[in-house]
Structures are given as C-alpha cells and as structure tokens.
Amino acid sequence: MRALKVLVATMGVLILAAIVAIVITLSNRSAKMGSGKPWTRALALPAGTALKDFRLSGDRLVVRTSRPGQRDRLLILRLDTGAVIGTVTITNAQ
C-alpha cells in the first residue's frame, strides 16, 4: 500500500512539472512572436504609377498598381522582411 501511495505522489509531481513546462514553453513562444526585427522598405514604383489597392493575406501584403497605357500589376511582399517575393501582371482572358 505504501508503494502505491509513493507512486501516486510521484505521478502527481510529474504531471504538475509537465504542466509547468507547457505553460513556460507557450509563454516563451508567444513572447517571441512579436519580437521580429523592425524593418523599413521603400517600394520603388515607376513614375506615373498609381497605387490602386492593397490587401493582407496571412503573412503577405498584396499591392495592386496601375500605370497609364500598361496592365495592372500585383506586387506580393512578405510582411516579416518587406521583400518583394512575386509580381503578377493582370491580363484580360481571350
């Protein structure tokens, strides 16, 4: 009977230690989420280019630009670094 009590007490202590470890891990991860390095990025657009629209999509920013006499373009940027990761030219389907 004594061995059973020791086993139950040991398991209780291990469960509490596991819960404390989980809480500490979650706390550390949530603190790191907002600690990214701040960045500044200049988005160089050709003269005469107008910013028509922008949308957030997850960790991406999609910017729609328009230029007279040319097709609209979508610029896709990463929010964590500000890097342009893609460009899409919008055309009319035939």
Image (tube, helix red, strand yellow):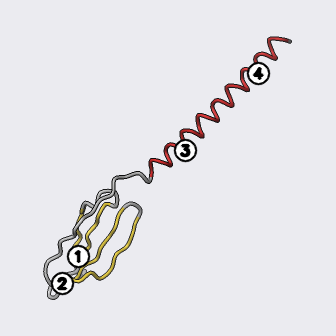
58 lies left or right of 67: right
Say which mark, if any, is on residue 9.
4
Q: Which residue is mark 1?
A: 73
Instruction: Give x and y (percent) for residue 62.
Output: 32, 70
How far, Cα to Cα, is label 4 from label 3?
27 Å
Q: Quadrant of residue 23?
A: top right
Describe the element under mark 2 as helix, strand or loop.
loop
Q: Quadrant of residue 51?
A: bottom left
Contact check, label 1 and label 3, Cβ < 8 Å: no
Say which mark, if any, is on residue 67.
2
**Front residue of this view, candidates 61 and 44:** 44
How far, Cα to Cα, is label 1 from label 3?
41 Å
Name which of mark 1 and mark 4 comes first in the sequence: 4
Q: Is residue 6 above or below residue 25?
A: above
- Which-is-in-front pick, marks 1 and 3? 3
Name which of mark 1 and mark 3 comes first in the sequence: 3
Q: Quadrant of residue 27?
A: top right
Q: Which residue is mark 3?
A: 27
**In the rendered structure, which amino acid carries the disc numbered 2?**
Arg
Using a 10 Å C-alpha cutoff, classify the residue at mark 1 as few (fewer than 14 neighbours), some (14 to 19) or many (20 or more). some
**Front residue of this view, candidates 30 and 63:** 30
**In the rendered structure, which amino acid carries the disc numbered 4?**
Ala
How far, Cα to Cα, is label 4 from label 2?
73 Å
Contact check, label 1 and label 2, Cβ < 8 Å: yes
- Which-is-in-front pick, marks 1 and 4? 4
Using a 10 Å C-alpha cutoff, classify the residue at mark 2 as few (fewer than 14 neighbours), some (14 to 19) or many (20 or more). some
**In the rendered structure, which amino acid carries the disc numbered 1?**
Arg
